[in-house]
Amino acid sequence: MVLGNEGYLKSDIPLLFNPRTVMAIAADMPRLILDQARDASYRIAEISKAKLFVSCKRPWGKSFGSGFTDAIQDICHIGLFKVGDPHQRPLDLNTFSESWELLDQKS
């Protein structure tokens, strides 16, 4: 899990969202763990008043030569959004660099 403070480097422009939170869990974990992670993500979205709550299934990293790139542990900082400032365009699914699915927040 990674929490990013959007205001840290962008204090001079209005922010569309803050914080940026990314939670990842391996899909092969036991069902109980997956359910607990899902429940925790809903709670975090509620507490942080998430403007957008999304999910995707993707590899932990993408094969590149003898290693990998686009690691999930880096996605909060680089590669989550399309090129450009996400605070300067509409905040919707089109702002992401990969395909994400909108989730409903529990009430």
Image: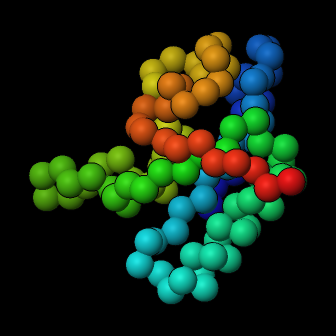
Q: Residue at x 61, y 27 (%)?
A: 92
**Position of 31 compared to 62: left or right?**
right
Q: Position of residue 97 (x, y in %)?
A: 43, 32
Q: Position of residue 10 (x, y in %)?
A: 73, 22
From what the image shows, is residue 38 above or below residue 15? below
Q: Residue at x 75, y 50 (%)?
A: 105
Q: Residue at x 72, y 69 (%)?
A: 39
Q: Position of residue 77 (x, y in %)?
A: 54, 41
From what the image shows, is residue 50 above or below residue 34? above
Residue farthest along the left direction in this orientation = 65
Colour pattern: rainbow
- Number of callouts: 0
Q: Which quarter of the rendering shows the C terminus? A: bottom right
Is 9 or 13 nearer to us in this picture?
13
Q: Residue at x 54, y 83 (%)?
A: 31
From what the image shows, is residue 77 above or below residue 7? below
User: Which quadrant of the figure has residue 87?
Assistant: top right
Q: Position of residue 15 (x, y in %)?
A: 77, 23
From what the image shows, is residue 58 above or below residue 20? below
Residue 61 in sight in this render: yes
Residue 44 in sight in this render: no
Q: Which quarter of the rendering shows the N terminus? A: bottom right
Is 84 or 9 nearer to us in this picture?
84
